Amino acid sequence: MGVICYTLFAAGVLAVIIAMFFGLSESPGSVPWPWAVLANAALIAQFPLAHSLLLTGWGGRFLAQLIPGPHGQALVTTTYAIIASAQLLALFALWTPSGIVWWRAEGAAFWVISATYGASWLLLLKASFDAGAEMQSGALGWMSLLARIRPVFPDMPTQGLFRLIRQPIYVAFALTLWTVPVWTPDQLALAVCFTAYCLLAPRLKERRVSARYGARFEQYRAAVPYVLPRAAPAKDHPHAE
């Protein structure tokens, strides 16, 4: 499970980085037009829909049952990461390009935008570590099973980038969508749809977090903004230690 998880995770992330760097103009999908519009729309929709559904209580029980035997529950985070990675890999490996390139950065602009694109991914990496790298990568499940211990989920994240905004992972991913050096109708469609997801989906996530942590999360939510950091951090931040 660990090998499968990390292989798909690496392949999925690499596919995202490369495909978006070229504005989805180099993806290998070959569905004939106009059917490609429906195929591409389905590829966009399948990730946020399943990603959110599997985070519900029903989704957690479903994930636990996917692995037969007594270890399905322990491997839930690993199974979830495998599915999410496979979804990303499918999206960017099966995308059928429109063949239209609106703009391609050249010269100094190319290097500046490429550096910004790389910085956005580093920001996403930092946010993921702040949230708990083992859980985000799916390692929590298989490493706990290997150590013969129950998975211990990380505490509610409030440090690092989570001191500035409540949803740094979603914000960082949204930034990667808009800092690419090649712009096509394909990239615009992806950026608009996934940015909307990054702004709306965390609302559902925060309901689950609120139900789990109660007053502690409500205090954190009152002190830390949603996606846009304040000009100056609140002095009465309850988790400033």
Image (tube, grey):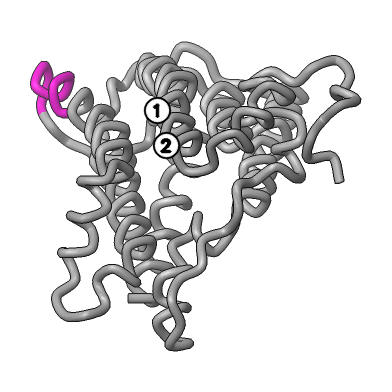
* Residue at image coords 63%, 37%: 216
* Front-lying residue, 161 or 89: 161
Q: Which residues are magenta?
A: 32-39
Specify the quadrant that holds the N terminus: bottom left
Q: Quadrant of residue 225?
A: top right
**Which x, y percent locates residue 230?**
79, 17
Callouts 2 and 1 close, C-beta under 8 Å? yes
Tell me the residue that label 2 is attached to: 208
For label 1, the SS is: helix
* Residue at image coords 33%, 44%: 55
Tell me the residue that label 1 is attached to: 204
Figure check: 86 above or below 69: above
Q: Is residue 79 visible?
A: yes
Amino acid on which disc 2 is placed: Arg
For label 2, the SS is: helix
In this picture, residue 53 sits left or right of residue 184 = left
Amino acid on which disc 1 is placed: Leu
* Front-lying residue, 192 or 208: 208
Would you say residue 199 sits in the magenta stretch?
no
